[in-house]
């Protein structure tokens, strides 16, 4: 049953990806994802997270955006900050990284586990290379500085 529910989330996100009119999709689609995750036990949520980490960039982006937008908290040891930051680390799409990077600092504070810091910093540098706004560049450099120290 749980695998079917995880597949439901995956397939649902895939349908969102294929829908070209994605404006404000979080208000329509995130409750569906949240209802499924709320029905999982702690162990089932952890299994789901492990599966999510193998999904496509759009799926990872959508899950990270879902966590950031809803404030959803997982029940187990893999906290939502960890899931958000790990999704960020696994994404290469500059647009997705730029969007998620705006909330990376606060998600790092929510994280209670070790993270793939090198990959996170590499992705922050990608965002910096594609950002013209000096204030955001300084913000991202400060995040890197905080990670290093």
Image (cartoon, rainbow, N blue to C red):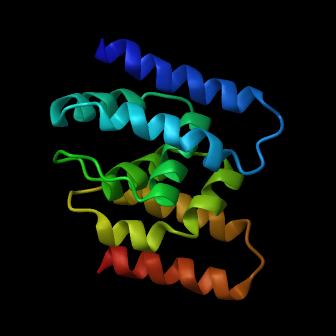
Question: Is residue 29 shown left or right of residue 4?
Answer: right
Q: Residue 140 appears at what percent x and percent y?
A: 55, 77
Seen at 29% across and 81% down, the residue is 149
Question: Is residue 136 shown left or right of residue 109?
Answer: right
Q: Quadrant of the N terminus?
A: top left
Closer to the camera, 116 or 28? 28
Q: Residue 92 appears at what percent x and percent y?
A: 60, 46
Question: Is residue 41 shown left or right of residue 103?
Answer: left
Closer to the camera, 110 or 147? 110
Q: In the rendered view, tell whether residue 9 sits above or below residue 99.
A: above
Looking at the image, the residue that sits furthest to the right is: 20
- Could you say which quadrant of the image residue 106 lies in? bottom left
Q: Residue 7 appears at what percent x and percent y?
A: 45, 17
Closer to the camera, 104 or 129? 104
Seen at 78% across and 30% down, the residue is 19
> In this figure, what is the number of numbered marks?
0
Q: Residue 35 appears at what percent x and percent y?
A: 41, 36
């Amino acid at each position: 049953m749980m695998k079917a529910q995880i597949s439901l989330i995956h397939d649902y996100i895939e349908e969102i990806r294929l829908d070209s009119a994605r404006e404000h999709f979080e208000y329509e689609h995130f409750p569906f994802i949240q209802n499924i995750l709320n029905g999982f036990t702690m162990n089932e949520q952890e299994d789901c997270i492990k599966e999510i980490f193998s999904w496509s960039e759009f799926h990872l982006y959508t899950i990270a955006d879902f966590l950031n937008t809803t404030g959803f908290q997982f029940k187990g040891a893999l906290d939502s900050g960890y899931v958000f930051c790990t999704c960020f680390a696994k994404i290469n799409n500059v647009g997705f990284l730029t969007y998620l990077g705006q909330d990376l600092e606060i998600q790092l504070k929510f994280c209670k586990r070790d993270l793939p810091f090198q990959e996170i910093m590499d992705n922050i540098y990608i965002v910096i290379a594609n950002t013209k706004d000096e204030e955001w560049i300084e913000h991202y450099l400060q995040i890197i500085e905080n990670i290093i120290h």
